[in-house]
C-alpha cells in the first residue's frame, strides 16, 4: 500500500509543528521543518528536530525550500494566525496547485485561512479541547478510541480506491458485507455518482461501486492486508452476483 | 486520689472518649466550621434572632408589650449565653493543655502544679474572651441583667452580632483591619487637631471673651462638627481669633476627609479581587462534583465552552489578566491566580467537593506540578492533564493523573492522515470532532431489557441507520463471533462482533450514526422497559 514518500514542508516549530513533523517522519514521508528567522526554535532543536530558519516573508526563500517546485504538501502551523494567513497567501501565489493544510488559533480565522488559500484548516485547540471534554464525559468511548484507532495497535482507518478492474467494481456496497467477510467496517464512501464528498455509511441510499470511488474502512491491519490481496488477486466472490 | 491526679485522669479520659470528641465536633461544626453544612442555617437563625430582639426593644420604647416580650427576651438571652459558652468551649481543648503541662512537667522532672495549669488555661481562654467578636457577644448579653437605661443602649450592640453571621460584613471588617496602621495614624492626627482646635476655641470663644462656647465638651463637639465638614452651625465663632481657628480647622478637615476616603477606597480596590474570589468560592460551596479547570488558554476555552453547553458546573483558574477578563465576559466562574498555589486549589474545594481537576496549561511543568498538588489534596479526585510533548505523558501519570492526554498527537495524526489519505482524514476529523451530526455514541444494554439476550443480528441496526463499531463487555467474555478484541482498563472492547454475538445486560454498544438515530434507539430502550 505504501507509495513513494511525499515531500512535505512543515512551517512552525511549536508543539503542533513538532508533533506533525514527528508523525509524518514516522510514516516515512520526507519532512522538512522550517520556521521564521525571528522565531524561537531552540526548544524544537533541543528536542532533536532539524529546523531551518528562513525569512518567511521572502518569496525566494520559500521557493528555495521547495514551494512551487517539488513539494507536495505545505503545513502552515505557525502560532500566529496573521503569520499563517500571510504565509498562505505567499505560498498560494507561488504555487496555485499546492496542497496547503493550516491551523487556526481562533475559530473566526478559519474562514480567512480558507480565503487565503488553505486546502484544509484544522483547529487544533478545538480538537484538543473536545478530546479533554470527551475524556470527562464519555470516558469509555474516548478510551476505546485511544486504545484502538489512535493507539499504536491494530485498528486503522484507511481509504480504499476502487479500480475499474477489481472484482468489487460494479457491486453494491451492502452486498459486499465486508464486516462479515473481512472484519472490516465501512464508515463511508465517496460515490462519484453523488459527487466528490464523503458520504457516511449511515446514508439510506444504496451505493454502486465503480472505478474511482473510494471506501473509508476501519479494521485491523491484517484484515486490510487480506482485503488488498483479494482485490489484486481479482478473486471472484461466489453467490453475491444476483443479490 | 489527690486533686491533680483526678484532673490528669479526667483529661486522659476526655482525650480518649469518642463521644466527647464527637459532641465537641458537632458544636464546632454548628458554630465555627466555615465549611460545615449546618453553619449557614445557624447563622441565619441567629441573625433573625438578633434583629427581632432589637426590633422588640425598639417597639417597646413607645408601646407596652406585656409578658411575652420578657419571655421572648429571656429565650433570646438563653440562646446567646449558650452560644457564648459553646464558642468558649470549642475555642481550645482544656484537657489538651492539662496533658501538655503534665507531660512537660514529667519530662523535666518537676512537680505537676495545678496553679500553673490553671493559669495556662485561663490565658488561652482569655485570648478568646478578649477578642473583639467575643466582646460584642458579651455586650449583647450583659445589659439584660440591669435595668439601667444607659445599659439598655448597649443592647443595640446586638446588632454588631450580625457581623458574626454575615460573611460580607466580616470582609468589610478585615479590610479595615488590614489598613489599621493608616487608620491609627489618621486617628492620631485627628485627635491632635481636635485637641488643639477645641482648646483654642474654648479659650477664644468663652462667654467672657464674647463667644458662645459654654464648656469644653461643647468645644470638642464644635471642632468635630467643623472638621468633618458637617457644620451644623448651632455653635458658631464670633471673635476674629475664633474664626481664624475655624478656617484652619476647615482646611485641615478637608485633608482628613480625603485621606480617610482614599484609605478606604484603596483598601477596597486592593481587596476587590479577593472579595470576588471569595464570592466564587461561596458559590462553589453549594455545588458537588464540579470541575476545576486550570488554565484558560485556547484549549481551556474550548473545554469551558463544552462544559457550559452541557450546563456542568466548573471554575476556571488562570493567571493571565486578559484571559481572566475573557472568562468573565463569558460569564464563567473564574479566579485569577496561579494554579500552582496549593492554597488556591484548596480554597476552590479540591480535596472537599471538587470532582474533577483539569490541567490544561500550555506548560508541561505547570501541568505536572498542579497534577501532583491536586492528587495530594485528594486521593479520589479525577485528574485529566494535558501533555504538550509526548515525553510528559508518563510523568503526568506518575504525578497521579487519571488520564493524560496528548492533544497535539491527535492533531498530528489527523494532519498526517491528510498526507496519505485525504478522504479517510475527512472521516476521522468528523468522528473526532463529533461534527456533521455523525457521532460515535454508546448505548447501554440495560439488564432485563428487550436487548438483553438478543444477538446482534436480531437488533437490525442497519434499519435504524446505525453502524456497529463494537461492543464493550466485561473483560472475561469470550466469543467465537469476535475476531479482534482490545482490552481496556477494566473492560473489553469487542471489535465488529458477528451477527450471532449474544448481548448481555450491562454491555455497551458503540455505534456510528446520526444523532437522531441514536436518540431513537435510546428512546426505544426506555419505552420498552417502562
Image (cartoon, rainbow, N blue to C red):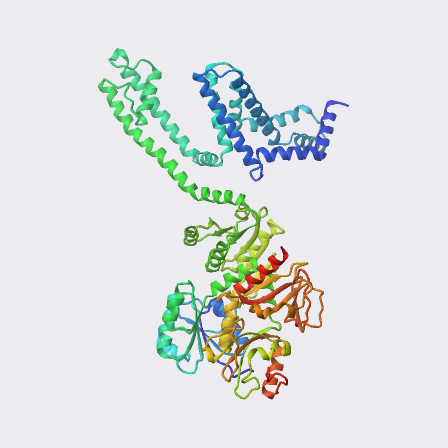
Is A119 or B129 nearer to us in this picture?
A119
Position in image of residue B159 (x %, y %): 47, 26
Image quadrant where residue A228 sits: bottom right
Question: Horizontal placement of B419 versus B100: left or right?
Answer: left
Q: Residue at x 31, y 32 (%)?
A: B255
Q: Residue at x 53, y 23 (%)?
A: B138
Position in image of residue A197 (x %, y %): 46, 75
Position in image of residue A60 (x %, y %): 36, 78
Q: Is residue A149 visible?
A: no
**Quadrant position of the C terminus of chain B in the picture:** bottom right
Image quadrant where residue A76 sits: bottom left
Question: Horizontal placement of B261 versus B422: left or right?
Answer: left
Is B318 or B6 nearer to us in this picture?
B318
Is B378 or A199 nearer to us in this picture?
A199
Q: Residue at x 59, y 80 (%)?
A: A176
**Quadrant position of the N terminus of chain B in the picture:** top right
Position in image of residue A135 (x %, y %): 56, 60
Q: Is residue A70 visible?
A: yes
Seen in the picture, residue B344 relative to B257 is either above or below; the reply is below
Seen in the picture, residue A192 relative to B14 is either above or below; the reply is below
Amino acid at each position: 500500500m505504501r507509495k513513494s514518500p511525499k515531500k512535505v514542508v512543515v512551517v512552525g516549530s511549536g508543539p503542533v509543528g513538532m508533533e506533525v513533523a514527528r508523525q509524518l517522519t514516522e510514516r516515512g514521508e520526507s519532512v522538512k521543518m522550517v520556521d521564521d528567522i525571528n522565531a524561537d526554535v531552540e526548544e524544537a532543536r533541543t528536542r532533536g528536530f532539524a529546523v531551518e530558519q528562513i525569512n518567511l516573508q521572502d518569496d525566494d526563500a520559500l521557493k528555495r525550500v521547495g514551494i512551487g517546485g517539488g513539494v507536495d504538501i505545505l503545513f502552515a502551523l505557525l502560532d500566529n494566525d496573521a503569520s499563517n494567513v500571510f504565509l498562505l497567501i505567499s505560498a498560494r501565489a507561488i504555487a496555485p496547485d499546492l496542497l496547503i493544510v493550516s491551523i487556526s488559533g481562533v475559530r473566526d480565522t478559519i474562514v480567512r485561512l480558507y480565503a487565503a488559500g488553505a486546502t484544509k484548516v484544522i483547529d487544533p485547540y478545538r480538537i484538543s479541547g473536545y478530546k479533554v471534554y470527551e475524556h470527562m464525559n464519555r470516558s469509555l468511548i474516548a478510551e476505546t478510541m485511544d486504545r484502538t484507532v489512535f493507539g499504536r495497535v491494530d485498528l486503522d482507518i484507511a481509504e480504499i480506491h476502487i479500480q475499474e478492474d477489481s472484482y468489487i467494481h460494479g457491486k453494491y456496497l451492502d452486498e459486499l458485507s465486508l464486516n462479515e467477510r473481512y472484519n472490516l467496517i465501512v464508515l463511508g464512501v465517496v460515490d462519484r455518482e453523488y459527487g466528490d464528498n464523503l458520504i457516511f455509511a449511515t446514508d439510506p441510499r444504496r451505493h454502486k461501486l465503480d472505478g474511482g470511488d473510494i471506501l473509508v474502512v476501519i479494521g485491523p491491519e491484517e484484515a486490510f492486508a487480506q482485503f488488498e490481496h483479494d482485490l489484486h488477486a481479482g478473486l471472484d466472490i461466489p453467490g453475491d452476483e444476483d443479490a | 486520689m489527690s486533686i491533680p491526679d483526678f484532673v490528669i485522669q479526667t483529661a486522659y479520659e476526655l482525650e480518649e472518649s469518642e463521644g466527647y470528641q464527637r459532641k465537641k465536633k458537632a458544636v464546632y461544626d454548628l458554630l465555627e466550621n466555615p465549611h460545615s453544612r449546618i453553619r449557614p442555617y445557624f447563622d441565619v437563625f441567629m441573625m433573625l434572632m438578633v434583629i427581632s430582639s432589637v426590633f422588640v426593644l425598639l417597639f417597646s420604647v413607645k408601646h407596652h408589650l406585656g409578658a411575652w416580650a420578657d419571655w421572648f427576651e429571656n429565650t433570646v438571652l438563653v440562646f446567646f449565653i449558650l452560644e457564648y459558652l459553646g464558642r468558649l468551649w470549642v475555642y481550645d481543648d482544656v484537657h489538651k493543655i492539662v496533658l501538655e503541662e503534665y507531660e512537660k512537667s514529667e519530662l523535666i522532672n518537676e512537680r505537676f502544679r495545678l496553679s500553673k495549669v490553671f493559669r495556662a488555661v485561663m490565658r488561652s481562654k482569655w485570648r478568646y474572651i478578649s477578642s473583639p467578636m467575643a466582646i460584642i457577644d458579651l455586650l449583647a448579653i450583659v445589659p439584660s441583667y440591669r435595668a439601667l437605661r444607659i445599659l439598655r443602649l448597649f443592647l443595640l450592640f446586638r446588632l454588631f452580632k450580625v457581623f458574626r453571621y454575615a460573611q460580607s460584613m466580616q470582609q468589610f471588617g478585615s479590610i479595615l483591619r488590614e489598613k489599621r496602621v493608616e487608620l491609627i495614624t489618621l486617628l492620631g492626627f485627628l485627635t491632635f487637631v481636635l485637641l488643639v482646635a477645641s482648646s483654642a476655641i474654648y479659650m477664644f470663644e468663652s462667654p467672657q471673651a464674647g463667644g458662645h462656647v459654654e464648656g469644653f465638651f461643647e468645644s470638642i463637639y464644635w471642632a468635630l462638627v467643623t472638621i468633618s465638614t458637617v457644620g451644623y452651625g448651632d455653635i458658631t465663632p464670633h471673635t476674629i481669633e475664633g474664626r481664624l481657628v475655624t478656617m484652619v480647622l476647615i482646611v485641615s478637615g478637608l485633608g482628613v476627609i480625603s485621606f480617610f476616603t482614599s484609605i478606604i477606597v484603596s483598601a477596597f480596590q486592593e481587596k476587590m479581587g479577593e472579595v470576588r474570589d471569595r464570592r466564587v468560592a461561596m458559590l462553589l460551596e453549594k455545588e458537588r462534583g464540579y470541575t476545576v479547570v486550570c488554565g484558560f488558554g485556547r484549549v481551556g476555552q474550548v473545554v469551558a465552552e463544552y462544559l457550559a453547553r452541557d450546563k456542568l458546573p466548573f471554575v476556571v483558574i488562570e493567571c493571565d489578566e486578559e484571559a481572566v477578563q475573557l472568562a468573565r465576559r463569558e460569564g464563567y466562574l473564574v479566579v485569577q491566580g496561579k494554579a500552582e498555589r496549593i492554597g488556591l486549589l484548596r480554597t476552590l474545594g479540591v480535596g472537599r467537593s471538587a470532582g474533577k481537576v483539569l490541567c490544561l496549561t500550555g506548560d508541561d511543568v505547570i501541568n505536572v506540578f498542579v497534577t501532583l498538588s491536586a492528587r495530594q489534596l485528594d486521593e479520589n479526585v479525577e485528574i485529566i492533564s494535558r501533555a504538550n510533548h509526548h515525553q510528559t505523558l508518563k510523568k503526568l501519570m506518575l504525578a497521579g493523573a487519571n488520564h493524560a492526554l496528548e492533544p497535539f498527537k491527535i492533531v498530528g495524526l489527523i494532519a498526517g492522515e491528510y498526507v496519505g489519505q485525504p478522504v479517510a482524514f475527512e472521516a476521522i476529523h468528523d468522528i473526532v470532532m463529533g461534527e456533521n451530526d455523525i457521532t460515535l455514541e454508546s448505548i447501554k444494554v440495560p439488564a432485563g431489557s428487550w436487548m438483553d439476550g438478543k444477538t446482534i443480528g436480531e437488533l437490525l441496526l442497519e434499519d435504524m441507520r446505525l453502524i456497529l463499531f463494537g461492543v464493550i463487555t466485561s473483560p472475561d467474555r469470550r466469543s467465537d463471533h469476535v475476531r479482534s478484541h482490545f482490552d481496556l482498563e477494566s473492560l473489553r472492547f469487542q471489535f465488529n462482533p458477528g451477527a450471532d454475538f449474544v448481548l448481555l445486560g450491562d454491555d455497551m454498544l458503540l455505534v456510528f450514526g446520526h444523532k437522531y438515530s441514536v436518540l431513537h434507539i435510546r428512546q426505544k430502550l426506555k419505552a420498552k422497559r417502562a
